[in-house]
Every structure is written in structure tokens, then in C-alpha cells.
Amino acid sequence: MSDQLLTVNNLSVAFQSGSITTKAVNGVSFSLNKQESIGIVGESGSGKSVTATSILRLIPRSFAKITSGEIIFQGRDLIKLSAGQMRKVRGNDISMIFQDPSTSLNPVFTVGNQLVETIRAHRKISKKAAKQRALELLDLVGIPAPDKRITMYPHEFSGGMRQRVMIAIALACDPQLLIADEPTTALDVTVQAQILNLMKDLQEQLGMAIIMITHDLGVVWETCEQVLVMYAGRIVESATVKELYQRPLHPYTWGLLDSQITESQDSDAPLSSIPGSPPDLSYEVTGCPFVERCPYAEAICHQETPPLQQLADGHAVACHFQTGSNTLERKEHAYREGTFTRS
Amino acid sequence: MRTFLLKRSLQLIPTLFVVAVIVFFITRMLPGNPAAVMLGPQASAEDIAAYAERLGLNDPIYQQFFDYLINLVKFDFGNSLSYNQPIVNLIMERFPNTVILAVSALLIAIIVGVPAGILAAKKQNTIIDYLVTTLSLVGVSMPIFWLGVMLVLAFSVNLGWLPSTGMGSLDNGLWAFIRHLILPSLALATIPTAQFARVIRSSMLETLSNDYIKAARSKGLKETFVIYKHALKNALTPLLTVIGLQFSNLLGGAVLTETIFSWPGMGLLIVNAIDKRDFVVVQGSVIFIAIIYVVINLIVDVLYKVVNPKVNLDGGSGGAN
Amino acid sequence: MVEVANELEQTRELQYAKARKEQAFTRKLLRNRFAALGLGIIFLLIVTAIFAPLIATHPPNQMDVTKSLLGPGSEGHLLGTDSYGRDTFSRIVYGSRISLIVGISAVLFGAFFGSMLGLISGYVGGRTDAIIMRIIDGMMAFPFILLAIVLMSVLGQGLVNVVIAIGVSNIPGFARVIRGQVLTIKESEYIEVTRSLGARHGRILFYHIVPNSMAPLIVYATMSVAGAIISEASLSFLGLGVQPPTASWGSMLQEGKDFLVLSPELATISGLAILITVLGINLFGDGLRDALDPKMKV
Ligand SMILES: Nc1ncnc2c1ncn2[C@@H]1O[C@H](COP(=O)(O)OP(=O)(O)OP(=O)(O)O)[C@@H](O)[C@H]1O
Ligand SMILES: [Mg+2]
């Protein structure tokens, strides 16, 4: 119990646009221990970012709403906090870094300015002390010559360096939890590895928990212990990383795994992707949300939504045919283009 | 920065040259003998011939143009017949009055328009937003000469609170001066105020949707801080462009406003000169205003760079973000 | 067989998508209540201008000094009379013609020559572009209304001259808008492809660039009509517009200005007519821009 840092219970988020309600997140539950890292994977639009930003209550207030659930962080339900209390959590207890470092830094202020303002938003210290801290942070994230860099504007940095700055800002107040929303997607492949290594090092050094959002199962493999697979605003499978690789259960996860480039892969072999597209979340989903794209779907899948069922070893999956008594046979190349046609 | 300034200043030369050419040829398009037109119907044939000689109208056209350019460079705009003095003197006497009017209007526009635009963006889709949006659309559609007349009707004719014409002398105290300034500067400020509100509203809305605003919020900054520090500075870039553009409108609007309120500025000078067919004055004043306008745009470009460090040094008015 | 059916379906889907897009545009425009209001005002203006002789209660220039400066409603004069005893309502009705004629013709004039310059400048580029743009910059150095004033003072009063003066003042704006469009479109991939396929300049210009520049051109032109109407009224207000006794809202306002005490309606009504017309056009223009492309920088 004392180890538990964050528990999300039955979180649902909806966007309202005119008369259309989009249920972007639907009853998501998971929990996270101190110093643990958890990965969230899933296709574009599966609700990863919305889940993450809801934890910090950063979804646009005017048209998005948390419709149900609780987010217990260190014993407090963040949803019930006042705006002022919530502000004190952001950047202080929970920090976030975003996908594109070139757009998440304000172009018209120096890097130092943006670091110092974060520190001084939460710590009552002098400008000078804050600047000293900023220099230490830049050094910590591996930016050379911090005393020169601190007076520069974001556009004078490379993409990787900008993401380092973002990490420095996120770490400014020693957060317990760092949410990283696709922190490497916008970067070059070589830089991606550097940033991931940096994050891993810093996590060990500073002992924080990480929620790592990504499309790339490889990133999860490198950095996380636990992984959640999201689809259509729901968690469809959750397991330890090792378990997921050795014994993936959900057909959607199989599809995701098939569509990853693996090192051993023969470069001529066609990369398969899951045909079709996720359901439109502005309509009520009946049955399994994956049914239209699932090569294994049967009648029941159209009628009943499978719940997320806990199996042995903390492995959970939401599929009618993976309940322990039922098991599916994973077919080779089930998603390969041409071999799969929609019914 | 210095090379940027130099480069932009050099760019002014062709523009000003074109301005000079345009004005020269428009005034040469005058029907009939310009000397006869300028001297009016009562002038005798000898007078006209002598005057034409003095103006160099008998020289070949390229010679005339060349002399005209030389004079311009020397800041010599010629002499006014109707006022009987060098046009430079007239301009130096009138231009400050136009500046007073234009600057007061600009200040009103910034003080009222910018906060209104911010407020509307902050309260998007609320009654306040609709109010600002509607009022500003009425504002940009306003025929300001009509608004001027209506202000006179309300505050001078009906209520008798404020004078309807002329400019107050500072010798009679600050209040006398301001009393005369209120109505004309209000009339002149209407369009820029509305324009600023519109521009700031839309650029704030655009800025507020940026990732760095979300990032700023995720750092736990106060909302006022997010809006007034992070969003506003970025939203100011388009405002600067519009301020530059509006200056042209202010100088043009001044012609109308000054006519209604008999405000002794450049606009009234030009309109009166047209009435008196004193084309040398028209030509000189118009060139002068064009020069001022071009210089203001240069200043706006420089400010652009100060506000937005990303605009590259030699690209001139390159885009923001 | 299957392929043919597939292709057919695809074509149908494309057509369907296109139809939906067009429908969406019209719906968006009309659902925007403000734009619809603007359209209503414009419609009213056009009807008034066309049927002016039927709507007006008196000949617009018929003077009767014995009935000067009558108040609204008296002796069959709906909105009263001016200092010459002319019926204000009828003059307002006829004044709509001047506003409309000048607004539309001056913008067509400016749009035609401005677009030509912009097309040539943007498409040819290089030295031609530099020269044309310097000329445009020079023209833009004059406050819009000042350029029109100077031109009018040279050309002299009259409807055609007003159209020319305001039309010329409109040229640089159109040239800039079109040039910007051409530059963007020219760089786009599909033009490169078309060119690499050996298309001729004329074809590229008139089949690709011109149609793709239409949306911003239309929005800009709509807004410019509002500006031109204000300019005409301004010129007439300064006594530099259409020749008296032709009824123009600007000149009516100028006459009304001298009778603010005796007959304030005169100035009030003519100005209101200008304001409502311009507001209507701007409402419509805003709606048009939002429906076509909210991000459009016009
Ligand atoms: N600002 C918004 N307005 C309306 N709907 C939104 C908004 N943001 C997200 N959504 C809805 O929420 C769904 C989930 O979006 P989310 O950004 O969480 O996906 P994601 O999994 O992070 O995708 P990606 O991998 O592309 O980042 C989207 O499909 C969309 O329908
Ligand atoms: Mg995302």
C-alpha cells in the first residue's frame, strides 16, 4: 500500500462538440508504484494522450470533461482538487513532457527563463538561486556549456537538445511521477536512443515513476516494467513487459506486434499493419470495439463487450476467447495485407 | 541587428523613388497648363507664362523630373502660392498636429482594443465574447466621417459638452487642449480599436491552442501567467503588423477626421489645398505622408524582430513561429 | 469484374465526398446566422438599387424650396426633405445605386489589374517580380483614401472617375494577395508534376493557379467592396465624388452636416445607410472566409 503512487479507477473522458459527444477514454483503470515505469501503447487516437493529460487535468475545460472515475495520487483524488491545489501538483509532484519539443517550448522566451519560471512557481527562492538550479538541471540532462545555453532561445537548439531542456524543466522540482507523451517520436533515430537512455539514467538516479506513452513497443521494452495496451479509449491488455512479449493474448496486441519492425526481420518481408480503422467514438460502441478488424471475431463479439479480465500473474485481457478456459490459436500473418479481408 | 537596419533602410530607396514617380506623373496629368490651373482663372497670360518658366514647365520632361528629384532629396517641396510660403514650413507647422491626433487615436485603440480582444479570447463563446465580436465588427464597418458628425451632434450640438471644431492651445491649459482632442481622436480611434480587438482575439485563440501553452500549464504556472506572459507575447506579433497597417489608415482617416473637426493637420491642409487648386501643396504633403508611412513600416519591422527573436536577421518581414 | 465494381464504387465515393464538401460549405455559410444576416442586407441593397424608381416616392432630384428641411413624415415625405426640398427617402433609395455601382465596378477594376500584376509577378518571378513589387510597394505607401483623393483631384468629379480612382487604389492589395497565392501554389507538388509532364505556362496559370487562388480572391474582393463603398462615401463627403445633384450617401451626409441643428435626421440616416450596408458586406465576408477556410490570411 505504501508503495502505491498512482491509482486510476474507471476513468472516462468525453469531448463535446456541438451535439456530438466523443467518448475518448472509457473506464480506464490502472495503478503505478513508486519508482515504477509503465508504458501505454496503442494506435493513434486510442486515447493515450487524453488519459495522460487527464491525470494532470490539462484537457480543455470548455469542451472536454472527465465524466467518471478517480485519480488517486499519494492518497488524494486529483479530480476533487481545487484549481489552485491542482496547479501545485503540476510540475511539482507530476511533470509531463510532450511529443514535439520544438512546439512545447515557447519560442519567444529564453530557455533559462522557462526553467527559472518553473522553479519559482513552486519554490520560494531568489532569482539567483533559481538560475543556479537551472544551470545544474541543464548539466544534469547533459547539455554542454549550460552557462551559455541558458540565455539562448529554443530555436537555437537542435531537436534532441530541446527535448533535454524539456526534461530539465520537468525535473526542476523533483517530481514523483513523470509522464512522457511520445518523447522520442519527433526525433532522429540516433537521438531517440540517447534521450531514452537519459530518461532511464535519470529515473535510477532520481527515483521517480514514469508513464511512457508510445507507439513503439521497442521503447516500452527498453524502458518499462509494465505495459498497458489501449484501443478505442479502453485498456484491452495489461501485463508485465516480459509477459507481453512472451505470451501476448489480445488479437489487437498480436496485430501491434506484427506491425513492429524487429531487428531480426528480413528487410524484404512486408511489414503488416492492421487493416481497417478504429471505431468512431462519437457513436455508442456495441460489442467488442475491435470486432470489425479482428480476424478471429465471432457472433458473440458483435453483441457483448468483453470486460478486462484478470488472469494469472497480473496479466489481464479483454477478449471473449482469452479467458483462461478459452484460448485462441494465434495465426501466422493474420494481418498481412491481402490475406485478410473484412467480413 | 545593424546589418538588418541598414538593409531594410536601403530597401526604402526604390519604394520612395516609385512614390516620387507616381506623384510626379499624377500631377503632370492635370488637364491643361499646370501653371494656368495653379494660378486660377483670373491670371493673365504673361503671369502664366512667367510662372510656367519659374516652375520649369518649359524644360523637357526628364529635366523636370530630374530637378524635382533633386529638390526632393534636398527636402525642398517648393512654394505654396495660396499660403505664400515654402511648403516645408507648412508641413512642419501642420504635421505635429496630425501626429497628436493619430497618436491619441492609436493609444485609445491599444488601451481599449487589446484588452477587449484578450478578454474575448479568454471567455471564448460566452456573452462577453459575442459582445466584443459584434461591437468590433460594427467598428470596422464604421464610416468614421459619419461617426464624427454623430459625435458632434451628440456632444456638441445636443449636450454642449465638448467643442466641435478646432484645436485647443496649450496656453489655455491642458484641459482646453484635451477637450478639443477628445471627439476627433475618438472618431479616428474607432476602426483601429475594433481591428485590434479582432486581431488580438484571433491570435490569442490561435496561440492558446499551441503546445507550449499546454506545456506551460503542465509546469504548474498560474493561469494569468500563462495568458499574459506566454500567450500574449506571441499574440503580439500579428498586432504589430496590424498597427503598421493601421497607421496608414490613421493618416488617411486623419484627412476625413480633420475635415469634420477643422483640426489643423496635414489632412485639412491637403483638402483645403485641393479646394484652392494649390497642387504644389498637395504634391508635397502627399509625398511627405508617404515617406512617413514607409518609415513607420520600417520601425514596425524592427520591432517585429525585437518581439520575435525567430525572425531572421536579413529576411525582413519573415513569418513568425 | 470485381475490379470494375471497385473502381465504380471509388468514383462514386469521390463524387459523394465532393458533394458532401459543397453541401458542408453552403450549410456552414448559412448556419452562420451572421453571414445569413449579411446576405440578407446585401440582397436588400441590390433589390433597392434595381427597383429604385418603383420604391422611391419622389424623383430624387426634384427640388421644392418651399418645402425645405421638412421633418420625417410630413407632407408625404417619409424621411423628410433636405435644404433644397428634395425627398430624403427617395435620395437614399437612389443613393444605393451609386454605392453598389462604385463598390462593384471599382473592385472589379482593382481585382482585374491587381490580379494580372500579381499573377505575372508571382509566376514569372525574378526581375519582373522585383520591379512590379517595388511599384506595388510605392502605391501602398499612400494611405488608401489619400491616393483616391489625389486621383480625384486630378481627374475631376464624376461617377467614372470615382470608379477609376478607387479602382486604382485597390490594385496593390489584390496584386499582393494573388502574388502570395501564386507563390504558394507554384511551390506545391502537383504543379511541379504538371510542369514535369510538359504542361504549358498558360495551362498551368489558368487551369491550376487561377482556380486555386479563387477562394482568397473572392473573400478579399467581398471585403474590398465594403471598403470601396466607404471610399466613395468619403470622396463624396469631401466633395470629390459623383457630380451633384446625383444622390450619393456621402454627399447627402455632407449636406446634412451643415443642418445638424435644424434637421439632424439628414446626416443620421445617410450615415446609417452606409454603416448597415458595409456591416452587411463584412458579416457576409467573415462568414465566407470562415466557411471556405478559417485559417485564410486575408
Ligand atoms: N482536442 C480534442 N478535441 C476533440 N476530440 C479530441 C481532442 N483530443 C482528443 N480527442 C479525441 O480523443 C481521441 C483520443 O485522442 P488521443 O490524443 O488521446 O490519442 P492518442 O492515443 O494519444 O493518439 P496519438 O498516438 O496520435 O497521439 C481521438 O480519437 C479524438 O477523437
Ligand atoms: Mg497522443
Image (tube, rainbow, N blue to C red):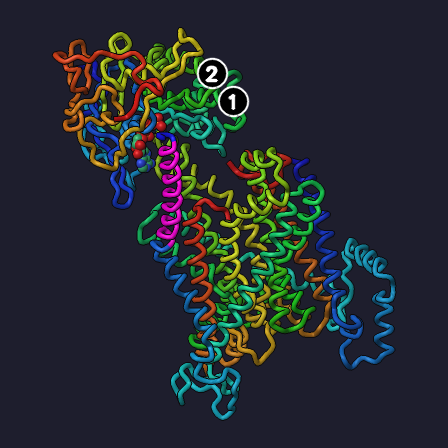
Percent coordinates x, y for residue C281 in the rendering: 45, 61
Q: Nearer the viewer, mark 2 or mark 1?
A: 2
**What is the secondary structure assignment of the residue under circle 1?**
loop
Residue shown at the point (23%, 34%) measured from the top left: A66
Residue shown at the point (60%, 56%) measured from the top left: C112
Percent coordinates x, y for residue B7 in the rendering: 69, 39
Percent coordinates x, y for residue B14 in the rendering: 72, 48
Indicate the amino acid at tag 1.
Ser
- Which image quadrant for residue A55? top left
Measured in 3D between alpha carbons, the distance from the residue under mark 2 to the one under mark 1, in whole angstroms, is 10 Å
Name the residue tied to disc 1: A158
Determine contact: label 2, label 1, CB under 8 Å: yes
What range is drawn magenta here? C4-29
Farthest front residue?
A: C1
Farthest left residue?
A: A325
Chain under disc 2: A
Can residue C119 be seen? yes
Which of the two labelled residues, at mark 2 and mark 1, occupies the earlier sequence position? Answer: 1
**What is the secondary structure assignment of the residue under circle 2?**
helix
Horizontal arrangement in the rendering, residue B319 relative to residue B28 (left or right)? left
Indicate the amino acid at tag 2.
Val
**Which of the image's four quarters has the N terminus of chain B?**
top right
- Residue C155 lies within the magenta run: no
Report crowding for label 2: few under 14, some 14 to 19, many 20 or more residues within 10 A (C-alpha). some
Can residue B168 be seen? no
Name the residue tied to disc 2: A191
